[in-house]
């Protein structure tokens, strides 16, 4: 048979290709894979428009049983070993001249999860010189990043040293995404603690796009984790961010906050929004810029507006009031500003949130109004927006956990029993 | 008596190459290289006949005025002057580069598509490769993760909202970013890189009757979309009808599954499983897509290969 055209084609349709490959010897399969990756037909259907020569190999691997997959990986390892041998004998410039082959081989190695090729690929990376094109370095790193596995997944931790190299690349804007991904595969909690550094690298290059880029990289990885790991991840990422915020980078905090919000916003079910709001509430309580972060909270809640239940409202209001602590004027007396003729029940609650940041008001209304048991009242000539209703989780005795963070004397400024319950409703009805 | 001259495009191209000072014998070496390398395919079309498709396609391209061959010949002569040792190892690349000449060919403007909504079907896998700047979607990843990533994108798009919109923008921006011809180690860049941004489309009305994605794939002759591939069908209107052109042989050289129409006929796809003629095919530059115009018409996984037997109706 011709090496370029490969063996004859004893198949008549695409689905028979894996069966045919399974019948080949290891040597034949290795030759076939190598030739195909070099762009030759090698006995397989020609690439069609918008198709890479390796695509049919990916299809065959996808359809293969475990035995053929193992054979496939052995063949692929042989291909990479031969490539490494060529580099050793001809120098790293060989890779620049055979970039297409290298890229196709690396892509297939990652796709087939061919950990057997790790040693040769690491060798290739370590042999690269300054003269090599950056694309060559990137394509090898990308492949290595795809192969990294947790240390406990094998007897010998072969990935550790390379992961340390990946960590050092986190500040390289072009490679930071790959580097973060590699560390994440190795240990997601370790990666979580690197979130501020990673976000910092993104911020340094593109401040506006950084939160979105962070979420874009983080969200697919998070989706693949068990829920327990997801919670640990967000906690660690948040802790690391708070520590970083001590050094005064508000932009960094905002970037991470926004990135996490987007991450969880697109992975519903990975973690409830209430939990996430709790994280934000904690942060809001610590932040000196509560107003800004209330806006984040509002946007987060509004994101999943359709699923916004009464329990969420309780949490939301809790968050709002934590923020309100920072914005309340020490001399303000909400009681005097309060007037409401519309109270209907005996157990209504009056929740007072400042409308000082008028830009939040529309958002608050938008979120609260759809809840049928919450009525919105806007007192005239008032510096306060008053929400009247029955947020079920909000009772002084056991509802909103957020109030544990509020001093009792402050609580009275934040939430009021209905006038009737407080003995004031009757007074109002009497016109007093 | 008609004046003596080239009888077809290939002859015109050969003469043009010689006129532009290609070394003696360069053309023959070029053709030999085409024949001896993987660029001359042993056509594999399942139930269809075998043949030297690519060269046949060149020879059958009678809609191309021979005068344009001389424009192409200038660039091709420069390529041939490098000598066989410096040609790219894979001559498919040469053919790919030839696609770039289409700009100079000035493919005919499509008629009868004024106001039409166009659709194109794309594999999500391709976007992951194209969008290399957006890891991890663009990163090499194991098969199972690739599957999960596709599902994650599917969920994002279904969820709607600002995030899905931004993702759609990114996907539509990458609609036509095919295999980049200029890579490290290559001696030459593509002559007209802008023309790589070519999207193959048909009209929405003509594919409305195809219920399943598999049927649509078959009708459009997209043999590279295989079982379990996740595909997206984009739809959009183009601002100007002049942006839509009729694809010609050179554009189809990137793959075997394209059959040029006879002169005067409309260019239509072929269902390679049944041999039936399908919807009209058009091309346009990706730059012609108005901002925000792209919508996802449908999406999902293919259930079979193009050459698998479809399930019996009613089963």
Image: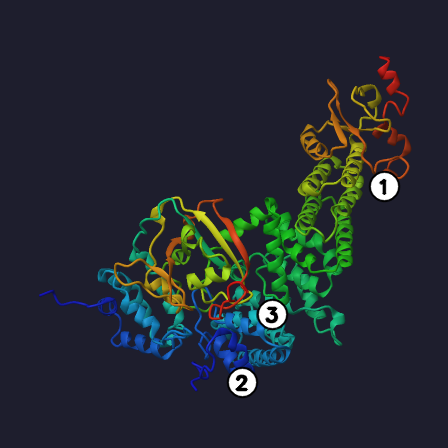
In the image, which disc is placed on residue A24?
A: 2
Between residue A147 and residue A173, name the one nearer to us. A147
Real-space Cα distance between discs 2 and 3? 23 Å
Q: Mark 1 lies on which chain?
A: A
Q: What residue is shown with label 1? A: A401
Have a look at marks 2 and 1 and say if they share a chain: yes
Q: In this view, does B233 lie to the left or right of A281?
A: left
Element marked by disc 2:
loop
Please report whichever mark, 2 or 1, sits nearer to the chain's N-terminal start.
Answer: 2
From this viewpoint, which residue is outermost toward the left? B1
Q: Dividing the image into 4 quarters, which one contains the C terminus of chain B?
A: bottom right
Q: Position of residue A402 (x, y in %)?
A: 84, 40
Q: In which quarter of the image is residue A282?
A: top right
- Circles 2 and 1, Cβ within 8 Å, touching? The answer is no
Q: What residue is shown with label 3? A: A110
Q: Where is residue A375 in the image (x, y as percent from the top left)?
A: 75, 28
Q: Which chain carries label 2?
A: A
Q: Quadrant of residue B61?
A: bottom left
Residue beneath the point at 58% across and 58% down: A174
Residue beneath the point at 65% across and 51% down: A215
Q: Mark 3 lies on which chain?
A: A
Q: Is residue A262 left or right of residue B292?
A: right
């Amino acid at each position: 048979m011709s090496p370029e055209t490969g063996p004859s084609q004893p198949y008549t349709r695409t689905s028979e290709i894996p069966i045919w490959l399974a019948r080949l010897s290891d040597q034949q399969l290795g030759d076939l894979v190598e030739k195909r990756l070099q762009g030759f037909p090698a006995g397989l259907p020609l690439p069609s428009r918008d198709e890479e020569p390796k695509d049919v190999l990916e299809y065959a691997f996808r359809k293969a049983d475990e035995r053929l997959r193992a054979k496939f990986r052995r063949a692929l390892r042989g291909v990479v070993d031969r490539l490494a041998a060529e580099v050793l004998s001809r120098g790293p410039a060989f890779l620049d001249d055979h970039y297409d082959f290298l890229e196709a081989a690396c892509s297939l190695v990652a796709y087939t999860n061919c950990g057997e090729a790790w040693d040769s690929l690491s060798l290739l990376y370590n042999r690269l010189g300054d003269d090599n094109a950056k694309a060559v370095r990137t394509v090898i790193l990308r492949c290595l990043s795809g192969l990294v596995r947790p240390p406990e997944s094998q007897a010998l931790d072969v990935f550790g040293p390379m992961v340390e190299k990946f960590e050092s690349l986190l500040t390289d804007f072009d490679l930071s995404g790959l580097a973060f991904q590699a560390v994440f595969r190795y240990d997601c909690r370790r990666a979580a603690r690197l979130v501020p550094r990673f976000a910092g690298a993104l911020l340094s290059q593109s401040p506006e796009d950084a939160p979105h880029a962070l979420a874009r990289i983080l969200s697919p990885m998070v989706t693949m984790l068990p829920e327990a790991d997801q919670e640990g991840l967000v906690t660690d990422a948040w802790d690391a961010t708070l520590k970083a915020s001590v050094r005064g980078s508000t932009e960094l905090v905002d970037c991470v906050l926004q990135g996490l919000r987007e991450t969880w916003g697109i992975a519903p079910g990975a973690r409830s929004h209430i939990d996430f709001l709790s994280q934000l509430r904690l942060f809001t309580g610590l932040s000196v810029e509560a107003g800004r972060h209330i806006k984040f909270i509002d946007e987060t809640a509004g994101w999943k507006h359709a699923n916004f239940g009464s329990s969420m409202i309780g949490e939301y209001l809790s968050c709002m009031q934590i923020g309100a602590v920072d914005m309340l004027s020490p001399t303000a007396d909400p009681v005097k500003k309060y007037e409401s003729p519309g109270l209907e029940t005996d157990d209504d609650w009056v929740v007072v949130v400042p409308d000082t940041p008028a830009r939040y008001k529309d958002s608050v209304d938008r979120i609260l109004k759809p809840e049928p048991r919450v009525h919105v009242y806007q007192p005239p000539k008032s510096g306060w927006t008053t929400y009247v209703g029955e947020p079920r989780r909000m009772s002084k005795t056991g509802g909103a956990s957020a109030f544990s963070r509020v001093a009792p004397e402050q609580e009275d400024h934040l939430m009021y029993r209905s006038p009737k319950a407080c003995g004031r409703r009757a007074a109002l009805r009497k016109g007093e | 008596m008609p004046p003596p001259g080239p009888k077809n495009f290939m002859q015109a191209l050969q003469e043009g190459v010689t006129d532009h000072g290609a070394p003696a014998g360069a053309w023959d070496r070029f053709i030999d290289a085409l024949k001896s390398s993987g660029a001359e395919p042993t056509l594999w079309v399942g139930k269809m006949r075998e043949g030297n498709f690519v060269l046949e396609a060149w020879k059958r391209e009678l809609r191309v005025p021979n005068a344009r061959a001389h424009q192409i010949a200038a660039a091709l002569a420069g390529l041939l002057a490098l000598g066989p040792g410096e040609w790219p190892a894979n001559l498919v690349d040469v053919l790919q580069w030839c696609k770039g000449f289409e700009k100079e060919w000035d493919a005919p403007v499509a008629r009868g598509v004024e106001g039409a909504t166009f659709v194109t079907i794309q594999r999500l896998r391709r976007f992951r490769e194209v969008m290399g700047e957006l890891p991890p979607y663009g990163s090499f990843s194991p098969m199972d993760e690739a599957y999960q990533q596709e599902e994650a994108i599917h969920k994002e798009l279904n969820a709607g909202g600002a995030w899905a919109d931004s993702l759609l923008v990114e996907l539509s921006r990458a609609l036509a970013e095919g295999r980049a011809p200029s890579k490290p180690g290559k001696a030459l860049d593509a002559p007209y890189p802008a023309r790589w941004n070519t999207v193959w489309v048909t009209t929405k009305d003509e594919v409305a009757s195809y219920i399943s994605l598999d049927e649509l794939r078959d009708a459009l002759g997209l043999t590279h979309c295989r079982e379990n591939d996740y595909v997206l069908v984009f739809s959009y209107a183009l601002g100007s009808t002049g942006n839509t052109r009729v694809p010609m042989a050179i554009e189809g050289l990137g793959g075997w599954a394209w059959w040029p129409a006879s002169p005067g006929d409309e260019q239509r796809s072929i269902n390679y499983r049944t041999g039936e003629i399908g919807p009209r095919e058009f091309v346009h530059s990706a730059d012609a897509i108005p901002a925000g115009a792209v919508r996802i018409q449908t999406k999902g996984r293919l259930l079979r290969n193009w050459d698998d037997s479809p399930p019996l109706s009613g089963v």
